[in-house]
Image: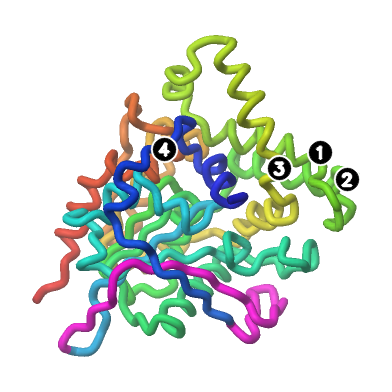
Amino acid sequence: MRMLVAAALALGTCLAPLAASAADAWPAPADGTYVVPSFTFADGETLANLKLHYVTLGTPHRNAAGHVDNAVLIMHGTGGDTNQFLRDIFAGVLFVPGGLLDPAHYFIVIPDGIGHGKSSKPSDGLHAKFPHYGYRDMVRAQHDVLVDALHVDHLRLVMGTSMGGMQTWLWGETYPTMMDALMPLASLPVQISGRNRVWRDMIVDDLRNDPGYAGGEYTVEPHGMKAAIDMIWFVGSAPLYDQSLLPTRDRADAYYESDVKTRVPRYDANDTIYEFESSRDYDPEAQLGTIVAPLLAINSADDQINPPELGIAEREITKVPHGRFVLLPITPETRGHGTHTHAEIWKSYLADLLAKSAPAR
């Protein structure tokens, strides 16, 4: 539950209760865990028995040549986990019968990234002695799950949101011939810099320099966790939507007191520090020209983490041989950064990408 709540904060998802009407319309996912006996991270650190948790929906199909041709990899954002996508606003749109990613036709794989969900993470016991993982470590671990655990040698689609969107760019560069299409949402294909970098630094600083952090060996969450949660909520929020939901001073104050301020016990400071520091090695810009598969990047104009006025996506997409960028306009339905998980808003673009990238039969 801590990770699910963290995802809601970090990804700017909506504040209202989620509808459950479609929850029975998609098949129950199957749980799996792949254990790597000895995983060596990019910086040389190693971890014995790295646990990599994932869920799957559907069944892999192999073509006449014996290659899987219907696998879809979906990757979550910072602080999230597999549950991010098993909700009405995503699964209830895409995974239902007749949906664009209907498990009757696709084999969907959703992993918990290193440091997240039920995969190995600092709070399991190593605390601040946990190896310092980066995005490239996470991508390599996802590849291990697909190839070694699930025997998937090809992907119909790679897609991800926020951190998962950034990892989608890395997938296209690291394994360029392994997929038919790529769809990064709420991300930019450059180093995390500017304001985006500074607010992440603030979160890590609030936690690590809090006396209550005790070098990672705290017994209660340090006070800095409250400041970190406030920052995460703020950058992930959507001004137009939040104003409509909290139109008065009293409503806004009540929400802050009853919701935001009560989230501290659901977080772990070590996990949060590692989650935000994992972006330190993210820098796909120089290799964008090596991406072979068609790539469709989608951002929302009310995304305060990737604000449109920077013009970065428009500039960098020209380096991708088969790349396209879509900026969704602000509407009452968009949710800022969290628009990426509201599939109804952008599903028509996914349909177009799937149609245009379909392999010749």
Asked whether residue 20 is drawn in magenta, I would say: no
Q: CA distance from mark 3 to mark 4?
A: 28 Å
Label 2 and label 1: CA atoms lie apart by 7 Å
Is disc 2 in contact with disc 1, using a CB cutoff of under 8 Å?
A: yes
At a point 47% along the width and 66% down the height, the residue shown is 111
Cβ atoms under marks 4 and 2 closer than 8 Å: no
Badge 1 is on which residue?
223
* Residue 26 shows in this picture: yes
Residue at (34%, 24%) from the top-left corner? 332
Q: Position of residue 198 (x, y in %)?
A: 66, 40
Q: Is residue 261 above or below residue 294?
A: above
Label 4 crowd bin: few (<14), some (14–19), many (20+), radius 10 Å: few
Question: Marks 4/1: CA distance?
Answer: 30 Å
Q: CA distance from mark 3 to mark 1?
A: 12 Å
> Up-down: is 144 above or below 254?
below
Colouring scheme, one of rainbow, by chain, secondary structure, one colour: rainbow
Q: Amino acid at mark 3?
A: Ile
Amino acid identity at mark 1? His
Picture coordinates of residue 128 (x, y %)? 79, 62
**Residue bearing mark 4:** 18
As drawn, the residue found furthest toward the bottom would be 65
Q: Few, some or many C-alpha atoms within 10 Å of disc 3 (few <14, some 14-19, many ≥20)?
A: many
Residue receiving disc 2: 212
